[in-house]
Amino acid sequence: MLLERLGLEFETFSPDIDETRLNGESAEDLVARLAGQKADAVAADKPSTVVIGSDQVAACQGKIIGKPGSMSNAVRQLQDFSGKRVQFFTAISVICLETRLRLDHTTPTDVCFRELSDVEIERYVNLDQPLDCAGSFKSERAGISLLESMTSNDPTAIIGLPLIALSRALRKAGFLLP
């Protein structure tokens, strides 16, 4: 949905990579590494194609938070976020093996959750079912109602793809964007 905004033709792939955090790896380093590994995996089969890899993780009070995967985990994540500041990191890696292009960028987004009741959390999780979203919420949907504030220099980063940074990288790769 986000990439369609740029008016470019594209294909999507879901490379099978190990997303396990390395010992001592920060949230920002983890997400950058995963975006790069995803791009590398796809580019290996398509060396003349410009490939975009992307990933997102959240960090709260020193703990890295990924996708919940289940309703109960989503509820638990949001209970932990209630009344707290959570930092989301969204990374992109734009590469083309043939031209030796590699452009990497990570966009942070600070999110302040309001105090949430268990009833609100369960109602929200049932409504949006954010099981595949780092941090268990979708700001582009009803998840925005869970927040006090959100700060980022790229408003689409929290949705999963920082289009300002991506547009800059694609222009450097030779794409004509408006």
Image (cartoon, rainbow, N blue to C red):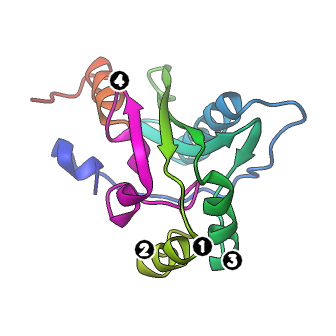
> Mark 3 near mark 1, Cβ–Cβ under 8 Å?
no
Per the image, the residue denoted by label 2 is 128
Per the image, the residue denoted by label 4 is 169
Q: Indicate left or right for 87 with 77 as reference.
A: left
Q: Residue at coordinates 29% horizontally, 50% vertically from top-left?
A: 2
Which sits earlier in the primary sequence, circle 3 or circle 2?
3
Tell me: residue 28, above or below residue 73. Answer: above
Helix, strand or loop at mark 1: helix
> Mark 2 near mark 1, Cβ–Cβ under 8 Å?
no
Q: Residue at coordinates 54% horizontally, 47% vertically from top-left?
A: 42
Quadrant holding the N terminus: bottom left
Q: Is residue 143 magenta?
A: yes
The image's mark for residue 118 is 1
Residue 134 appears in which quarter of the rendering?
A: bottom right
Tell me: residue 176, above or below residue 9. Answer: above
Per the image, the residue denoted by label 3 is 72
Which sits earlier in the primary sequence, circle 2 or circle 1?
1
